Amino acid sequence: MKITEETRISELLQQDERAGEVLAASGLHCIGCLIGGEETLAEAAAEHGMDPVLLIRKLNLYLNQEL
């Protein structure tokens, strides 16, 4: 799964529950928020003063590593 700035948090979590670990560790605790789930990663990062590119890199690295 390739994650982009336009990926919605709800879609991401449906594809891979492990994404919640990365989001929470990065300071995005919106996984349980009703509004947060419909935000894109870019929107959520902007609201929390984060660099969306860095967040997306973390997610792609973590979720696409071989287990």
Image (cartoon, grey):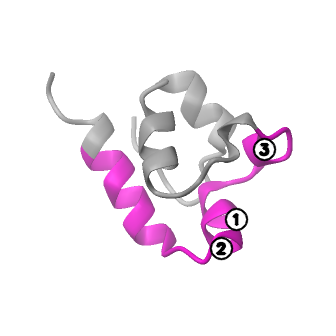
Judged from the image, the secondary structure of the residue bearing numbered disc 1 is helix
Gap between marks 3 and 1 measured at Cα: 10 Å
The residue shown at (46%, 57%) is: 26
* Quadrant location of the C terminus in the rendered image: top left
Q: Amino acid at mark 1?
A: Glu
Q: Is residue 3 left or right of residue 10?
A: left
- Does the magenta run of residues contain 46? yes
Q: Are dots 1 and 2 in contact, CB under 8 Å? A: yes
Residue 10, compared with residue 59, is above or below; it is above
Residue 34, compared with residue 43, is above or below; it is above
Q: Which residue is mark 1?
A: 43
Image x and y of residue 38, in percent: 78, 44
Q: Are dots 3 and 2 in contact, CB under 8 Å? A: no
Gap between marks 1 and 2 measured at Cα: 5 Å
Q: Which dot marks residue 46?
A: 2
Q: Which residue is mark 3?
A: 38
Judged from the image, the secondary structure of the residue bearing numbered disc 2 is helix
The residue shown at (14%, 27%) is: 66
Q: Amino acid at mark 2?
A: Ala
- Does the magenta run of residues contain 4? no
Picture quadrant of residue 63:
top left
Magenta residues, start to end: 33-61
Q: Is residue 7 left or right of residue 62?
A: right
Picture quadrant of residue 62:
top left
* Quadrant location of the N terminus in the rendered image: top left
Q: Is residue 35 left or right of residue 4?
A: right
**Lower sequence index among marks 3 and 1:** 3
